[in-house]
Image (cartoon, grey):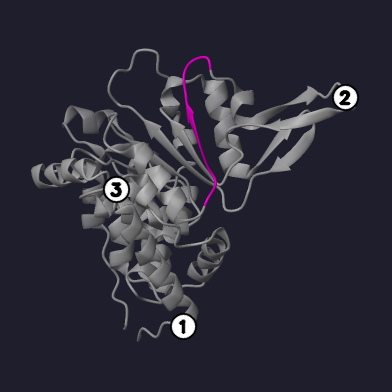
Amino acid sequence: MATNLTNEQIHVLKLSQDVINEVKKVIIGKDEIIIKVLLAILAGGHILIEDIPGVGKTTLALALSKALSLDYKRLQFTPDVLPTDVTGFTVLNKDTGNFEYKQGAAMTNLFLADEINRTSSKTQSALLEVMEEGKVTVDGKTYNTPDPYIVIATQNPIGSIGTQMLPESQMDRFIVRLTMGYPSMENEIEMLRSKQNRVTVDTVQPVVTAAELIEARRIIEDIFVAPEVFEYIARLADATRKDQYLKLGLSPRGAIALLKMTKATAMLKGRDYVIPDDVIYTFYDVSAHRILLSPKAKVNGMDSTQVLKNVLDTVSIPKIKK
């Protein structure tokens, strides 16, 4: 199977690289994370970043919003944040005598939900409902979120006092979970130099319009997937459900998320068709937050990465004719 990209696909590929180059101006040494967040956005999903404070999560979200020409809002989640802070509320206009809808923080193109685990489960559920349905209902009236609509939520794994971790059923709403981690010594030196030279998010230029992003998603949906790849994804999902080290495997929603990420990966690698390597490339990011380890895994000192590696090793990789 030969790669013969259409002009539309070539355009998407160029725009994607332009976005990556712009974000790299302020996020140094984290090219893989930038690519995977962009893949998730192109796949039409939401992103969960689980990491310690100060590694650049907010800067990454802001840089992406600027490069993609998207409206951006950020809400710091704390125990006193209410569902109405997220979804909005109606208020009486004394001049007209009518009730008017006041938008919540989530009504934007790119919403950064900072430290989502530090708010109540009721507020978490309000946001996750918006993510799932793309709309909010306030006092019986429904309001659609802007298109495109992207949520980047963060969790701080350090300092669990006063936190409310997301249940597994709600974690499943995020297409990927990523970790930025500390920079290398060389990258941290480069970062310090950029701060000295006043390289800020303001240097990031818009290179893609919201309309172009919507069109890019449509084009990626049409990426060719061979029957063998569909079967490979299904066999991987089934293997997680039967694995002795897992008590909760990959859900059907997770399998669909893996397919979407796989198509976006193929596009960014310059192909109009998917290969098994595309599935493997995003398998951990799509799957790790959707599974639950069994007591046997914990007794044997295994983490989710090790278990998922075993799954990949046991499921045979199909051969695709190119």
Question: Which mark is first along the chain, 3 or 1?
Answer: 1
Amino acid tagged 2: Asp
Distance between the alpha carbons at the discs numbered 1 and 3: 32 Å
Q: What element carries label 1?
A: loop
**Badge 2 is on which residue?**
95
Residue 236 in picture, x, y percent from top left: 34, 55
Q: In this view, does 57 lie above or below 277?
A: above
Which image quarter holds the N terminus? bottom left
What residue sits 39% from the left and 47% below the top?
Answer: 202
- Most extreme residue toward the front is 197
Is 77 included in the stretch rendered in magenta? Answer: yes
Q: In this view, does 253 lie above or below 298?
A: below
Amino acid tagged 3: Val
Tell me the tag on residue 82: none
Amino acid tagged 1: Thr
Location of residue 165 by image quarter: top left
Q: What element carries label 2?
A: loop
187 and 142: which is toward the camera = 187
User: Can you see residue 258?
Assistant: no
Image: magenta residue range: 70-80
Residue 182 in picture, x, y percent from top left: 19, 38
**Badge 1 is on which residue?**
6
Residue 102 in picture, x, y percent from top left: 71, 30
Which image quarter holds the C terminus? bottom left
Q: In this view, does 44 lie above or below 150?
A: below
Distance between the alpha carbons at the discs numbered 2 and 3: 47 Å
Q: What element carries label 3?
A: loop
Distance between the alpha carbons at the discs numbered 2 and 1: 56 Å
303 and 45: which is toward the camera = 45
Tell me the tag on residue 26: 3
Question: Which mark is first along the chain, 1 or 2?
Answer: 1
